[in-house]
Amino acid sequence: MAVEGTSVALPQFLNKIQLIKQGAEARVYRGSFLGKPTIVKERFPKLYRHPLLDEKLTHRRTVQEVRSILRCRKAGISAPVVYFVDYTSHCIFLEDIVGSITVRDHIASTQLSSAQKSPVERLDQLAQKMGQILAKMHDEDVVHGDLTTSNMLLKAGAESGETELVLIDFGLSYISALPEDKGVDMYVLEKAFLSTHPNTEALFEKLLKAYAASSKKSHAVIKKLDEVRLRGRKRSMVG
């Protein structure tokens, strides 16, 4: 649902729910909307930009985020339900994925837990699932823009009982068919993955292997990823 009119009641509503995060681009709230647990993402004005330019850029970013989420969901990729969009105040009302854990926390706890009989095997399965889902997302020409293990959630499936991987935070996402854009997306994930989870190079390679096997367009993307990696290494040597 999307609304273009003036939202008089929205500021009062936001004041009554919990502010859980404020970044450079948006404020994120947690509350209830239409009786459902909800995350509200509010993009606020950037005072350093000209008001007309700021309005145009913020509107475009909001549209891109909603479009990416809807495209993923249509393709069967788990992402939050979009309940409501107010393009006047640049607010997106999203499903709060209750009972979930970030992939970041899951990997960290699995590595630390001595009670797990086969932590490596369990993480291998997770890496394979991540690769398959990201391949599906890129085949839909959705570039996430901020792939990290904090922006992926694990939740027990309501029907199958299988663990469900949910992609979140599409704030920097956009639609692109270019292999280079998708290669950069994977490079961002690789850098974030290895810096957050040391000594997991082999795990990330399993993710890439699953990605390559699952994507119809993987060859060109992996080629671009290798080029971006090479450029990154050259910059590190110069620096």
Image (spheres, grey):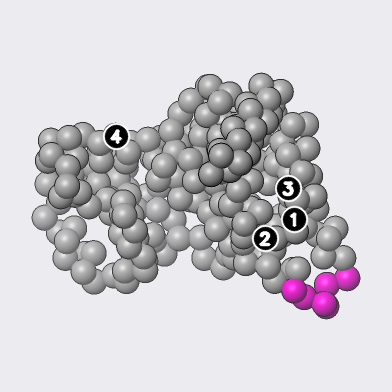
Which of marks 4 and 2 precedes in the sequence?
4
Q: Which residue is mark 2?
A: 197
- For the residues carrying marks 2 and 4, which lies nearer the camera in this image? 2
Q: Who is closer to the viewer here, 94 or 223?
A: 223
Which residue type carries mark 4?
A: Arg
Question: Helix or strand or loop: what does disc 2 sit on?
Answer: loop
C-alpha distance separating marks 4 and 1: 36 Å
C-alpha distance separating marks 3 and 1: 6 Å
Which of marks 3 and 2 precedes in the sequence?
2
Q: Which residue is mark 3?
A: 204
C-alpha distance separating marks 2 and 1: 6 Å
Q: Which residue is mark 1?
A: 200
**Residue farthest to the right?**
117
Q: Is residue 158 visible?
A: no
Which residue type carries mark 3?
A: Phe
Q: Who is closer to the viewer here, 65 or 190?
A: 190
Question: Helix or strand or loop: what does disc 1 sit on?
Answer: loop
Query: Which residues make up the magenta segment?
Result: 112-117
The question of residue 113 being in magenta is answered with: yes
Q: Which residue is mark 4?
A: 60
Q: Who is closer to the viewer here, 22 or 31?
A: 22
